[in-house]
């Protein structure tokens, strides 16, 4: 790959959308630079707009190409690094992986609002889980269980080996842990596998350093 890759991200502690493509790039074995923009600061918006046409992070810069939006970046990385197998090779599995990734991308607004990602908070159970959050969490557990049952025999992730779908759900895994959301055996094993990813450990260490 001739042109360098640069990923513009938000504060690692909070930016779930930035974590997703970063994990995909690491899974692809890509060499890339990172520009981290501090969120929740007076100059945050201006600093992001100076780089990103959408005014949001993350943003992938590859030569003259700019790709914004987490899922779009993951798709781009999968195309640039086909040998990494970031989507399942089987057509049925790949279709489902794209569907569950898109559902994460577009859905679960109550979980995001009530349970924002905070990688340095420790376990902070909700005093009471609102019904709409409980319903979204149940849907996620059902998705994970179906993926694992149908396509997960080859490894510990949703489709056996790590894929874009896992990158999309990694921040959800952190939310399940931080807020002590209800788990079953399948979801607990899956969350353990995601937490064990060296790349996630590296991101979390950087997020909480100092």
Image (spheres, helix red, strand yellow):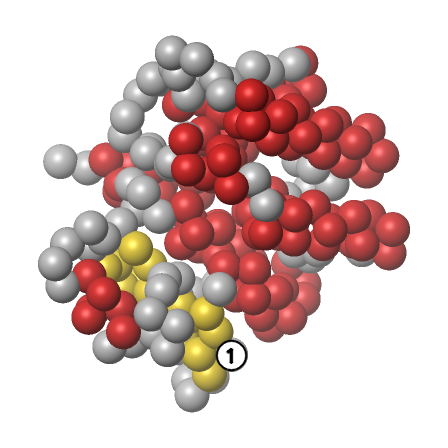
Q: Position of residue 11 (x, y in %)?
A: 26, 50
Residue 89 percent across, percent down from the top left? 80, 55
Name the residue located 56 percent from the left edge and 66 percent from the top edge: 72
Does residue 122 appear to the left or right of 21 in the view shown?
A: left
Query: Along the line of sight, which residue is nearer the eye, 157 or 42?
Result: 42
Residue 163 visible in the snapshot: no
Taking 94 as reference, is 126 left or right?
Answer: left
**Residue picked out by circle 1:** 1
The quadrant of the rendering that contains the C terminus is: top left
Residue farthest to the front?
Answer: 131
In this view, 149 is above or below 161: above
Q: Is residue 151 above or below residue 100?
A: above
- The structure residue drawn at horizontal position 31% and vertical position 21%, both measured from the top left corner, is 122
When the figure is inspected, residue 134 is found, relative to residue 173, above or below; the finding is above
Q: Is 147 rendered above or below residue 185?
A: below
Q: Is residue 182 left or right of residue 41?
A: right
- Helix, strand or loop under label 1: loop
Residue 105, how many percent across, how many down?
57, 51
Question: Whole-percent x and y of residue 96?
Answer: 79, 48
């Amino acid at each position: 790959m001739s042109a360098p890759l640069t990923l513009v991200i938000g504060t690692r502690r909070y930016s779930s959308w930035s974590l997703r493509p970063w994990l995909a790039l690491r899974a692809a074995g890509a060499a890339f630079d990172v520009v981290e923009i501090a969120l929740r600061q007076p100059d945050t918006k201006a600093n992001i707009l100076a780089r990103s046409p959408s005014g949001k992070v993350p943003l992938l810069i590859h030569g003259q190409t700019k790709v914004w939006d987490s899922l779009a970046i993951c798709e781009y990385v999968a195309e640039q690094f086909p040998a990494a197998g970031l989507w399942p090779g089987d057509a049925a599995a790949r279709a489902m992986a794209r569907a569950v990734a898109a559902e994460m991308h577009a859905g679960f607004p109550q979980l995001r609002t009530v349970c924002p990602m905070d990688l340095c908070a420790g376990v902070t159970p909700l005093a009471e889980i609102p019904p709409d959050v409980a319903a979204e969490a149940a849907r996620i557990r059902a998705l994970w269980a179906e993926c694992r049952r149908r396509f997960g025999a080859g490894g510990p992730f949703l489709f056996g080996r790590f894929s874009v779908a896992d990158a999309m759900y990694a921040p959800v895994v952190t939310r399940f842990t931080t807020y002590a959301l209800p788990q079953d055996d399948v979801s607990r094993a899956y969350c353990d596998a995601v937490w064990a990813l060296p790349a996630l450990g590296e991101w979390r260490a950087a997020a909480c350093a100092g």
